[in-house]
Image: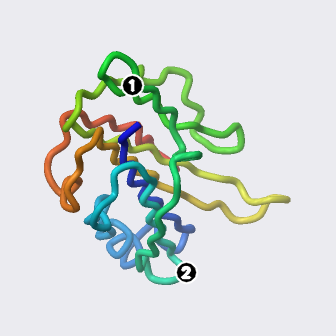
Amino acid sequence: MRVVVQRVRTSWTKASRGSTGATVRNAAPIAFNLPTGLTSALHDVSMQESDSFVPHMSVRDLSDPGLVLKESDGLLRVHRPETTIFSMPQRNRRPPALRLTPGQWLQWQINYRFVGTWGGPWSYRLDTFNVAYCPASPEVFLGTPVHHVDERAPLR
């Protein structure tokens, strides 16, 4: 399968929910240039409040991209991102899988709120999945996707 997934994960606490912190967090990109020559890989980008949302990048294999990808009859079926029972808000109705033809890409966004252990502080996360059914140039995700799925919900 010739697929490139860019997973951009932004994590924060209550400190970045309002005012200056939220301004910095909201300025964090949801897409980046890919490393040159990727044809089947996960480009993992992580940004955290604790280090001022500086992006940390790595390239991994596609064994666990955070969503299910299935190739059939020349199309790529992209199933919705996986969620956990430990996150909020509950999502009872979720969008169906989408199909891509070679050369197309999609962007899927979903956010979460996590309750700390033993009543500790909440934390928050925004996951943006940029998925290209190759070939993919390094700047592919900086353009406009064929499909955009927005599962972001109010996090309180």
Q: Is residue 23 shown above or below 149? A: below
Residue type at mark 2? Answer: Ser
Which residue in the rendered view is the most extreme toward the right? 118
Estimate how packed mark 2 is, as few (under 14), some (14 to 19) or many (20 or more) residues with alpha carbons within 10 Å.
Answer: few
Q: Secondary structure at mark 2?
A: helix
Q: CA distance from mark 1 to mark 2?
A: 36 Å
Q: Decide: marks 1, 2 in contact (CB < 8 A)?
A: no
Quadrant in the picture for residue 95 = top left
Q: Which residue is mark 2?
A: 50
The quadrant of the rendering that contains the N terminus is top left
Quadrant in the picture for residue 98 = top left
Q: Report the front residue among 71 and 147.
A: 71
Q: Is residue 134 left or right of residue 121?
A: left
Question: Residue 126, position in %: x, y?
Answer: 46, 54
Estimate how packed mark 1 is, as few (under 14), some (14 to 19) or many (20 or more) residues with alpha carbons within 10 Å.
Answer: some
Which residue is painted at 45% across and 54% down in the image? Answer: 42
